[in-house]
Amino acid sequence: MQKIVLIGAGSLQFGLGSAGSIMNSEVLKGSTICLHDIDAKSLELAAKACQDAIDERDLDFALESTTDREEALKDATFIINSIEVAPRFELWDQDLHIPHWYGNRQVFGENGGPGGLFHSLRVIPPILDICEDIMKLCPEALFINFSNPMSRICLAVKRKFPKLKFVGLCHELGHFMIHYARILDTDLSNLEIIAGGLNHFGVVLEIKYRDTGEDAYPKLREKGPNYLEKLDNQDVDLNKYILETYGYIPYTTDSHFGEYIQWAWDVADISGIKEFRDTYMTVIGYEGKKIRRLIKRGKGARLVKPDEERAIPIIEGILTDSNHIELAVNIPNEGIITNLPEDIVVECPAKISNSGIEGIKLGEYPKGLAGLLRNQASVQDLCVEAVLKKSKKIALQALLADPVVNSHKQAENILEEMLKQQSEHLQLE
């Protein structure tokens, strides 16, 4: 039987959704679900909701809950991680606004730019601690990561623990594909899509109609800009520019894609990005309070329902040797994109079988976009080195290499201020 550990389960949206997907699985019947978090109160709520769901539905699952990570990981076969360093939103505000104080024009501050560096410096060390315990206690387990900044976390894991089996998962492509169907006036099921690049920095490389085999990109290039221009409540001005200039459409919005580009501020929908960020923070806060109230009233079982993430289908595919294709996973490059460095983690489609996760070769990336991605590969290289060596000097070099940073003085000022504001979270010497 399987033991599936959910790390960060006290984040109730993640914990209850992941547990709900496991409980909905015929393949995983009889498995043990282990909830782990360092926040005992939130963990207790998650455990109550999950146990109520098991009892009310008479499900064949065992439930464990513990704040002790070693206890959680003992005999684990799959580990799903979605941790953040608290207080999440307060620190994210600093990541975004402190660079702005010094004239930096980053658009989002989560995964790229100065904000992405400090987010990485905070969250990668505790994730590497988790991975160290996995190598000691359950070295054959598969580690599935949902935490951001995805590419940098996965690269750090690859470098420090090269024998650890891991994959990073993100839902951006899955969420954005409906727009391609609308542009092309066809059912989504009629489209065959191949996409890739770096996490939050990738494009659709090929798109075809399944019924005819015809290339759908000419029509997408023709009709896409007008569709994106009229799209309400989505920050996609940069998407439109990338499609018109490079001929390929990104599969995430301006808020993410623009984090890696020095000229994004002049093109992206900055007001739309701000609205999305503010709404996201408000909704997450509201939903969290609502979930807590319902669990305390004994109504938590209804919240334990499948989410839309792909961790459980991948686990099922490995156990059943499904040989199905996942559209987007984050794994080491190893020749998947030939004109990007080998020592980087790329986002790509993959075949899932009892042998694990096998990336599908994408070949040469479009040259203009590959140039942008190679810039980011260099920044990620330095970012991970700064974490692994706990080096303030290399962190400064990562800022100086980042195309979003304007000057050496700006980089130095941002670094010093962030070290002052987040001293308890940044392990630099």
Image (tube, rainbow, N blue to C red):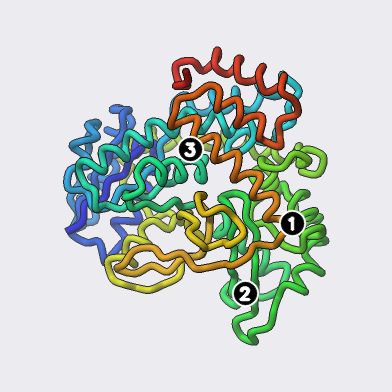
Q: Position of residue 58 (x, y in %)?
A: 19, 56
Q: Residue at x 53, y 31 (%)?
A: 119
Q: Amino acid at mark 3?
A: Glu
Q: Position of residue 387 (x, y in %)?
A: 46, 30
Q: Amino acid at mark 1?
A: Gly
Q: CA distance from mark 3 to mark 1?
A: 41 Å
Q: CA distance from mark 2 to mark 1?
A: 31 Å
Q: CA distance from mark 2 to mark 3?
A: 32 Å
Q: Residue at x 35, y 56 (%)?
A: 21
Residue, disc 3: 287
Precedes in sequence: disc 3 or disc 1: 3
Relative to 305, is 332 on the left or the right? right
Q: Position of residue 371 (x, y in %)?
A: 70, 52
Q: Position of residue 131 (x, y in %)?
A: 32, 40
Q: Residue at x 64, y 49 (%)?
A: 374
Residue 187 has which mark? 2
Q: Do the CB atoms of the residues marked 3 and 1 lie less than 8 Å apart?
A: no
Residue farthest toward the top in the current orientation of the protein? 420
Q: Residue at x 70, y 39 (%)?
A: 273
Q: Amino acid at mark 2?
A: Asp
Q: Secondary structure at mark 1?
A: helix
Q: Secondary structure at mark 3?
A: helix
Residue 368 has which mark? 1
Precedes in sequence: disc 2 or disc 1: 2
